[in-house]
Structure formats: C-alpha cells, structure tokens
Image (cartoon, rainbow, N blue to C red):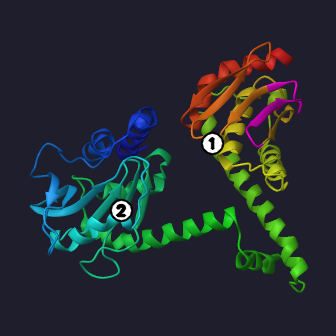
Amino acid sequence: MSEIADRLASLANKIAVQGKSIETEEATKNAFVMPFISLVLGYDVFNPNEVVPEFTADVGTKRGEKIDYAIVKDGTVQILIECKKLGAPLGLNQASQLFRYFAVAHARVAILTDGDQYHFYTDLDAPNRMDEKPFLVLQISDLDETLVPEIQKLTKDTFDIDSIVNAAEELKYIGAIKRVLVAQFSTPDADWVKLLTARVYEGSITQKVRDQFSVLVRKAQKQFLADQVNDRLKAALGGQGYTPPQDNASVSGSDASAAVAEASTHDADGGDGINTTLEEIEAFQIVRAIACSEVPAARIIHRDTKSYMGVLLDDNNRKPLARLHFNTGQKYLGLFDSEKNETRHPIDVLSDIYSHAAAIRETVHFYD
C-alpha cells in the first residue's frame, strides 16, 4: 500500500472511532478536514502562505462570504475547500459558495466535503466555471484504492494541475458509469433487462419472457456480486490473522461462492419484506471463514429475517453462532454463550468481526 493510502486508512480509522461524537461543522474541520489537508495532501495548515482559512474573495454584491479553506501553490490559489458537518448532504445546494468563488479566485479545483466524502470539481464544461457534477468522489471510510493515484496528484510535493484536469473528464465519466451500474445491479430497469436478455435468448422477447428474465437478471447479478465478494475475501483473509481451514474444513471457491449466491438470492427475492444486503453477505462470509477452521464450511448457514441475519450451525435455529444486526444506524454482532444468551457487540467496520474470532470458534464447540 502506498504512503498516501496508508494515511487515508489511518484517517478512516479516526472517522470510525470519533465520527459518532462529531456534531458540528467546526468539529468536522478540526477532526477530519485539517488532517486530510495536512497528512494526506501534505500542506502546512498553520502556514497562511499555503493554507488560508476563512478565505474571502467578494463576488459582485456578495460581500463578506467566506470559503473554509484556500490552498495556495506557487503564490496562486489552486484549490478551494468548502466543509459541511459529517454526514450532511453534499450536492448543488451545498456547493453554491464554491460556484461563486471558483471563477473569482481563479482556482482550478474545488472540493466539497463532510470530512468523510470528498467531491472534487473542476471546469470541464466551461472554462473558469465550476462544473455542476464532480469529476471524482472519494469516501475515506470506504476507500476505493484505484483513486489514490488521483489524490497523489493533488499533494504538495507532486501537485500537477495539468495532469489533474486532463484526467478529470475520464474520471468523471468512469464515476458516472459506475453509479449507473450500481443502480442497475440494485434495481435493473427494462432496457437493462432487455439488453442482457437479447445476448442470451434467441426467441422473441415477449412480455412473458421479459417478466421471466427480470427475475433471472436480478438473480444472476446477485450471484455475480456474491462471487466477487467471495474472491475478495479469499484474497484478504490470509493476512487477517485467520487460521486456514484444515482437511475437512476446507472449502473450494466454487462451493463457497455458490453457497453465498444461493443464500443472497433466497431471501431477497422472497417477496416477504426481507432485504439481504451485500454487506450482510460479506459479514456472513467473515463469520463463516472464522468458524470453518473448526467445522466444515458447508455446515455454516445463514438465515435472514427482517430484523437480523442469523448465522447457524447445521441450519438449526437451536445452534446459533452469531447474529448480524445491520438494520439500524449502529451495527451489532450478536454472540452467544453456552446458555445461548446473546450479547451484542457494536461494530463500525466489518473487519471488527475478526476481533471476536475466538468467541465465534468457542461457540462452535458448544454444539459440536
């Protein structure tokens, strides 16, 4: 992992630990935004020749308005940053001051942030006029490492505005395409279903066929995502303190992904109000990977309900290994003692489950 990625990961941990106590915009700036400017981008936040807080550049009849930070490089304002409270919406309404100041300050990059999400703008659509849509969206708590090289270009030591602007158009459309794919994987529309159906079905696409393939496309997409999650976990688990399964506990990639795919489609398409999320599936896989060092992986099954996802041994409700309470703002991992009393443990990121590995393995032995 690069140095920038390491620093972003460190900041992500800070957000996970301190995020719940942040209640104001000022606290957001002090706790998260200033460290981002300093530790990630490398600018001296206490040097007004590099970072200007409460930057003012009067616009027409608008007097005295301030942008939270202006970053200066080679004597010129290059980046404007407008901050909102952690968790606040980030959109056109929140970017109004950035729009007004962008042209006056002659900046080439504008950033709108809540300390976790960072929306980066430039002037692709019209020179010296900030675009309405960001060319890059970065979320520190759920870092897409493919974006780290783009953040590197904004750092003090390697600042390259030409490279940033040249890459911005490509990044803008890649981001937009990814968001379309996310929407289609969540709720495929008629055109998307028709496109995929035409690639695999040779007959006439009647309404009956469209209805049939609407279900099949949703199931295929869920299975595809489950396969991707499984592959990601298999690649990551070896470095997480995970004890590899031995002999009868081994599980092939195809068996594991098929099991997860079946689980993820069974409840989600049941029409009973149960919505199995990808995050629940990934958490189930982590619990399963921990427990399968003790018993064959095929014995570890999940059942989803409206209020929680249960992880069971032998698909038996009397043998609960864990419960995933992910349907509230705070996520909890429910663990059981020998009397089957449940204790809920708050988790902020899925990797927190690994800290309970010993308890999960001990629970397996209560039943086996």
Residue drawn at the location 90% of the way across and 78% of the way down:
208
Q: Is residue 98 left or right of residue 254?
A: left
* In the displayed structure image, the side of residue 250 where residue 28 appears, left or right: left
Between disc 2 and disc 1, the foreground one is 2
Q: Disc 2 marks which residue?
A: 94
Q: Which residue is mark 1?
A: 235
Q: Is residue 315 magenta?
A: yes
Visible in this render: residue 100? yes
Residue 315: image quadrant is: top right
Q: Quadrant of the N terminus?
A: top left
> Residue placed at 9% from the left, 61% from the top?
75
- Of residues 232 and 13, the one nearer the viewer is 13
Q: Is residue 174 above or below residue 327?
A: below
Which residues are the magenta region? Answer: 306-320
Sequence-wise, the earlier of marks 2 and 1 is 2
Image spot of residue 244 (x, y percent): 70, 29
Q: Position of residue 135 (x, y in %)?
A: 40, 68
Residue 64 picture location, percent across and down = 13, 61
- Three-letter amino acid code at disc 1? Ala
Pointer 2 local density, CA inside 10 Å: few below 14, some 14–19, many at least 20: some
Considering only vertical position in the picture, is 62 above or below 260? below
Residue 160 in magenta stretch? no
Residue type indicated by callout 2: Gln
**Which is the main secondary structure of the residues drawn in magenta?**
loop
**Label 2 SS:** helix
Of the pair 238 and 280, the residue shown nearer to us: 280
Residue at position x 80%, y 81% in the image: 198
User: Most extreme residue toward the top, as rendered?
Assistant: 338
Question: For the residues marked 2 and 1, what is the alpha-carbon distance in whole angstroms?
Answer: 39 Å
